[in-house]
Image (spheres, coloured by chain):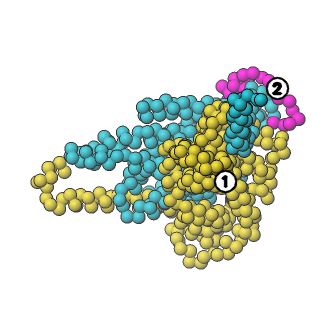
């Protein structure tokens, strides 16, 4: 006669195996796709950064250790792209945050047409970038655009710099001054994306307990005092979250720059090249896949660094 | 302003309230104008002749509307093809994303199995990794699999994201375990619990994921730019961009095509607005 406890154990084991198979069948469809199209390419990117490869399946990859990174050190175009990306980040992040917070505060009050205003502020975020960038390029066109024509009729400044030097209207995306160029794209970016961050701020504002404001009212606090002493401190986890997402997204920027600045050839000049453009071009135009991956690692490390700061910060804010 | 309330004239607080209210409306209206003007300009120009688009002072309502622009665009560019391609990609990606993420998320949230935490860590660790940092080797890989210039490439790279799994798992965790236990005792299989309990309960999270995936795929630029060089495969975004650079002086037509490209997203947005806002709010703060 078989030992009953053994049968029970075998049954339990079989059930355990069955449970595992069920669990894996749930994860497998997604994980296989995720593994093949995210994890493997990511690992490949790390390896590729230490190789020289023109991307052709017929050419063998050549191990060159740190040569790509050494070359990166002296690559003026890369540094210019990184600098432009930093400049764009420094412009976009504070302006988007201020606009989003300001709007959220306005639209968190009981105002007529609140939903209309919220939708209007949010819509550019979901609108097709290519379409809205085309409009912006027309609006900000240096000589024929309505913006400069309006400025011309108000200020009387000439469209083109006078021969003897002197003031003229900004040429926006085509201006020789890199800061004017950057301002143009930052303005566009704030306009397009602030609605998204406004919604995050609105959720943050709704999470603040009304008791705090009632207590402040009893103490006779002014609106301004309530903003500085209650709203802002209570919002700091939201602000921190928005800050991180904004910085990361700014470092990943590419499509905005291509659509605002580039012509049919999709090329950017020194004043407008950004990090992801450099990664893209080095691989797909110059056919230097290894070198491009070394640049991609710089992007990876920057974003990783910001994420780690976020984790530290979150601990601080939630503790 | 600093007087104590007892001595303040009766009408004063009310008046101050009114001034600040006016200020709020002024700011909101300025904002709305800045947000809407580009769209209005787009719409207005889409009904003009090229030579009238930049006339100044501009004519907001064209006296001689060129409705023919909206006929010509369908003939000059394969816009219908582009829209169809984008719609196809967005629907397939969204379907796969929501289905596989919620499936995987169920296992991560409610089942115990070996390697669960490790697998989930793989997802969480890559959530912040920018796609742009591995897009080049991903392209080399996809090409060696014969996926270059196929819609399948876009589907593969968009449909299995860490974000989807993470978001669904967070939501599933808020569903009480007792509910699943009770269903198990009633004889439901795990698949049954997923289909009959988790999915119906997580509609808000699923709608959020649907909207996000759909809009992301619809508006994706760099992915289709890398993979879809064949004109017949292009999406609205890169198709429109190609058209803009090809016919750079056809202002009226470009604006008409832009209007058409905006309509599907506008329709989706107006229909599901409430979910957009709720979705960002929940996924943004808790995510």
Q: Position of residue A254 (x, y in %)?
A: 63, 44
**Residue at 36%, 56% in the rendered image:** A109
A226 relative to B277, above or below: above
Q: Residues within 10 Å of mark 1 (few under 14, many from 20)?
A: many
The part of the chain drawn in magenta is A55-83
**Residue at 44%, 41% in the rendered image:** A239
For marks 2 and 1, give the one nearer the viewer: 1
Chain B: what color? Answer: yellow
Q: Chain of mark 1?
A: B
Q: Chain of mark 2?
A: A
Q: Which residue is mark 1?
A: B94
Looking at the picture, do discs 2 and 1 lie on one chain? no
B109 relative to B84, above or below: above
> CA separation, marks 2 and 1?
39 Å
Chain A: what color? Answer: cyan
Secondary structure of the residue carrying numbered label 2? strand
Q: Position of residue B192 (x, y in %)?
A: 65, 51
Q: Which residue is mark 2?
A: A62
Which residue is at the far left?
B7
Residue A292 seen from this side: no
Which residue is at the far front?
A1
Q: B111 and A311: which one is in front?
A: B111
Q: B144 and A21: which one is in front?
A: A21
**Residue at 62%, 54% in the rendered image:** B196
Secondary structure of the residue carrying numbered label 1? helix
**The stretch drawn in magenta includes residue A74:** yes
Q: B24 and A269: which one is in front?
A: B24
B154 relative to A43, above or below: below
């Amino acid at each position: 006669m078989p030992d009953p406890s053994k049968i029970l154990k075998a049954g339990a084991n079989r059930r355990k195996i069955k449970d595992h198979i069920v669990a894996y069948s749930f994860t497998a469809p997604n994980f296989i796709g995720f593994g093949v199209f995210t994890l493997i390419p990511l690992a490949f990117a790390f390896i590729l950064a230490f190789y020289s490869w023109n991307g052709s399946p017929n050419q063998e990859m050549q191990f060159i250790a740190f040569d790509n990174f050494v070359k990166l050190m002296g690559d003026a175009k890369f540094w210019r792209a990184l600098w432009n990306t930093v400049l764009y980040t420094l412009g976009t992040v504070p302006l988007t945050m201020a606009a989003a917070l300001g709007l959220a505060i306005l639209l968190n009050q009981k105002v007529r047409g609140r939903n209309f205003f919220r939708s209007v502020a949010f819509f550019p975020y979901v609108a097709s970038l290519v379409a809205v960038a085309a409009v912006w390029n027309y609006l900000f066109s240096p000589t024929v655009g309505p913006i400069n024509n309006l400025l011309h009729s108000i200020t009387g400044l000439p469209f083109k710099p006078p021969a003897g030097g002197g003031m003229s209207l900004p040429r926006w995306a085509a201006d020789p001054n890199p800061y004017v160029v950057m301002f143009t794209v930052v303005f566009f970016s704030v306009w397009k994306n602030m609605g998204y961050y406004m919604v995050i701020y609105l959720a943050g504002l709704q999470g603040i307990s009304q008791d705090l404001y009632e207590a402040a009212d009893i103490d006779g606090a002014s609106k301004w005092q309530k903003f500085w002493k209650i709203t802002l401190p209570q919002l700091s986890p939201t602000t921190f979250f928005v800050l991180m997402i904004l910085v990361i997204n700014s470092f990943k920027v590419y499509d905005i720059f291509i659509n605002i600045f580039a012509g049919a050839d999709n090329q950017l000049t020194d004043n407008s090249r950004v990090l992801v453009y450099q990664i893209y071009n080095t691989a797909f135009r110059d056919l230097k896949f290894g070198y491009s991956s070394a640049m991609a690692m710089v992007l990876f490390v920057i974003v990783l660094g910001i994420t780690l700061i976020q984790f530290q910060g979150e601990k601080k804010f939630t503790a | 302003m600093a007087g104590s309330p007892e001595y303040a004239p009766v009408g004063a607080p009310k008046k101050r309230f009114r001034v600040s209210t006016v200020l709020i409306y002024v700011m909101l209206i300025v904002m709305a104008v800045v947000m809407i003007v580009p769209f209005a300009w787009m719409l207005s120009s889409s009904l003009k002749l090229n030579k009238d688009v930049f006339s100044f002072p501009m004519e907001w309502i064209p006296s001689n509307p060129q409705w023919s622009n909206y006929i010509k665009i369908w003939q000059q560019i394969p816009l219908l093809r582009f829209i169809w391609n984008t719609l196809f990609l967005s629907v397939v990606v969204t379907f796969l994303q929501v289905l596989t993420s919620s499936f995987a998320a169920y296992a991560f949230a409610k089942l115990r199995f070996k390697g669960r935490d490790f697998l989930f860590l793989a997802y969480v660790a890559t959530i912040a990794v920018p796609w742009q940092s591995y897009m080049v080797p991903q392209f080399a890989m996809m090409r060696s699999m014969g996926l270059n210039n196929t819609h399948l490439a876009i589907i593969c790279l968009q449909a299995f994201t860490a974000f989807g799994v993470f978001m669904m798992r967070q939501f599933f965790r808020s569903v009480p375990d007792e509910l699943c236990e009770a269903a198990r005792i009633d004889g439901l299989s795990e698949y049954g619990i997923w289909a009959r309990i988790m999915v119906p309960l997580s509609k808000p999270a699923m709608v959020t994921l649907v909207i996000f995936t759909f809009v992301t795929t619809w508006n994706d630029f760099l992915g289709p730019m890398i993979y879809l060089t064949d004109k017949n495969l292009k999406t609205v975004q890169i198709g429109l961009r190609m058209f803009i650079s090809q016919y750079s002086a056809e202002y009226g037509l470009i604006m008409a095509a832009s209007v058409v490209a905006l309509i599907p997203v506008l329709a989706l947005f107006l229909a599901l607005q409430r979910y957009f806002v709720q979705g960002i709010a929940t996924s943004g703060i808790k995510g």
